[in-house]
Image (cartoon, rainbow, N blue to C red):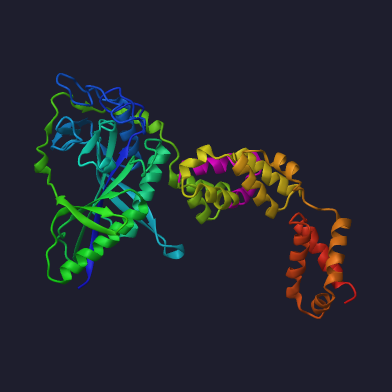
């Protein structure tokens, strides 16, 4: 039997505020355990939460960027459950009346002429506070520690409709959504630190059936790769169970990246299990048209708009533009480099170096470009040295690596290491004649029609000059001298 995969994703994005959602404690990551706490986020008796306005601003930004309907009246609720990392015994969240509903995110699938756009619907976007963190089995001890630093950190939960039909689509949706949040400046998108987290609901149903199958929730996936692998495993597991006549149990499962499997954690909770009710300590939130208009005026250029502009203004192929606009940091680096270079028509030249050398040293950490020792100005100055014939493209790669290691300017490196390109015709002629004298048989073979040997001679000249010879001049001189006496 053929089965259809049905996936819905719940993304928790930590908002980039300096303080928590209902108190003044800092949201700084990596502090000593329980340092960033106060009576409010610890739920001490008699304290009252006060809503951080910036968390609503950021949620409105996201709602507008994803074409959501914004509710003029929404309410915070208490989500009741008991776990050691939840000091109040409930989490302040939203349930019946969230900030926004009914939006969408468009993802692009396929390649070339088969590329298509698919719209993934959003059920809702709402605000809530994060829970603490449990640290288990420290140094082999038989008990756990609780760190409440994360308690009260503002989260924006973005819930998709079950419109995703494969693990690949799920991965692309997450990349696209993360990119939007990065451009909006509302979340840093760091999955390793937990500021961009995803839970997945997945079910299978016989092809053509309208009724959804029993869904399973997947947790503990901290990278796009793991989300895709966990979903792929779960598709296979559920299919095996169904084909053997079994029944899918509705539960919450954890992804074990080392073993490459999911394992049951607990039975899946339903909404009524949490006994939601309006939080009596927080007044309803009213969002008027003026507030929405103010946020709308401040929206930045989003990834899709920037991609189209890069293709139009810099004459970049779609592949280049798509890769460069994945994150605002990389896109900004590229544009600043083009400005420093001073030639918009050579956007493709800059693009090649950013996609090649810059992204290579970043190793997938697009946020790390902010601290990259090779500044856009340094890269642009290096490209000008290539244009001026001071260094070759091959030598430029050595210069780039040295800039990356030391942070020095390209001019300093070229001067100190003596990397200036050899462009003296007399000097190169002497090198070529020496190589031809040492290889008379190969010279004769070339002149007899074996023109593929030309690459050998170019290589020998480059070897003799330690890669410093001007490639264009080498080619011109070689062709002239090898053609003499034919």
Q: How many marks?
A: 0
Predominant secondary structure in magenta?
helix
Quadrant of the frame with the C terminus: bottom right
Quadrant of the frame with the N terminus: bottom left
Which residue shows up at 46% across the image and 44% down it?
A: 327
- Identify the residue at the far front of this view: 140
Which residue shows up at 86% across the image and 68% down it?
A: 481
Q: Say whether residue 89 is left or right of residue 291.
A: left
Which residue shows up at 42% across the image and 65% down it?
A: 114
> Looking at the image, is 153 positioned above or below residue 225?
above
- Identify the residue at the far bottom of this view: 448
| Residue 86 image-quadrant placement | top left
Numbered range of the magenta stretch: 327-352
Locate residue 177, reporting x and y percent: 36, 46
Q: Say whether residue 176 is left or right of residue 338.
A: left
> Looking at the image, is 212 positioned above or below residue 440?
above
Locate residue 140, reporting x and y percent: 26, 43
| The magenta stretch spans residue 344 | yes
> Looking at the image, is 422 positioned above or below residue 133?
below
Residue 338 appears in the rendering = no
| Residue 209 image-quadrant placement | bottom left
């Amino acid at each position: 039997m053929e089965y259809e995969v049905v996936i819905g994703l719940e993304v928790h994005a930590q908002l980039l505020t300096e303080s928590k959602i209902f108190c003044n404690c800092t949201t700084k990551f990596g502090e000593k355990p329980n340092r960033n706490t106060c009576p409010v986020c610890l739920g001490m008796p008699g304290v009252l939460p006060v809503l951080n306005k910036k968390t609503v601003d950021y949620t409105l930004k996201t709602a507008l960027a994803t074409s959501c309907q914004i509710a003029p009246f929404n309410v915070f609720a208490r989500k009741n459950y008991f776990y050691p990392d939840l000091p109040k015994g409930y989490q302040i969240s939203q349930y019946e009346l969230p900030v926004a509903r009914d939006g969408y995110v468009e993802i692009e699938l396929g390649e070339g002429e088969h590329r298509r756009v698919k719209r993934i619907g959003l059920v809702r976007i709402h605000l809530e506070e994060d829970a603490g963190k449990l640290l288990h089995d420290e140094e082999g001890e038989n008990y756990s520690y609780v760190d409440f630093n994360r308690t009260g950190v503002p989260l924006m939960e973005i819930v998709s409709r079950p419109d995703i039909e494969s693990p690949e689509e799920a991965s692309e949706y997450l990349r696209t959504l993360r990119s939007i949040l990065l451009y909006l400046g509302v979340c840093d998108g760091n999955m390793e630190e937990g500021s961009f987290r995803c839970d997945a609901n997945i079910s299978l149903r016989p092809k053509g059936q309208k009724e959804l199958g029993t869904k399973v929730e997947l947790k503990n996936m901290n990278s796009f790769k793991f989300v895709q692998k966990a979903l792929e495993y779960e598709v296979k597991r559920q299919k095996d169970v169904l084909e053997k006549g079994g029944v899918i149990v509705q539960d919450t499962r954890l992804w074990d990246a080392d073993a490459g499997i999911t394992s049951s954690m607990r039975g899946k909770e339903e909404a009524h299990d949490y006994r939601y009710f309006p939080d009596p300590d927080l007044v309803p939130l009213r969002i008027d048209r003026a507030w929405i208009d103010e946020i709308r005026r401040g929206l930045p250029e989003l990834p899709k708009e920037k991609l189209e502009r890069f293709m139009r203004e810099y004459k970049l192929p779609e592949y280049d533009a798509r890769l460069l606009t994945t994150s605002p940091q990389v896109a900004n680096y590229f544009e600043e480099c083009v400005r420093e270079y001073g030639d918009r028509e050579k956007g493709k030249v800059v693009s090649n170096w950013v996609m090649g050398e810059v992204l290579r040293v970043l190793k997938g950490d697009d946020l790390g470009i902010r601290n990259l020792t090779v500044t856009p100005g340094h890269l642009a100055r290096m490209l000008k040295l290539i244009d001026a014939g001071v260094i070759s493209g091959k030598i430029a790669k050595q210069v780039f690596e040295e800039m990356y290691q030391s942070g020095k300017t390209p001019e300093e490196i070229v001067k100190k290491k003596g990397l200036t390109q050899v462009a003296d015709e007399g000097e190169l002629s002497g090198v070529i004649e020496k190589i031809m004298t040492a290889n008379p048989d190969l010279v004769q073979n070339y002149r007899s029609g074996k023109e593929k040997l030309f690459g050998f001679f170019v290589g020998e000249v480059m070897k003799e000059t330690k890669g410093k010879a001007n490639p264009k001049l080498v080619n011109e001189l070689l062709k002239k001298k090898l053609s003499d006496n034919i």
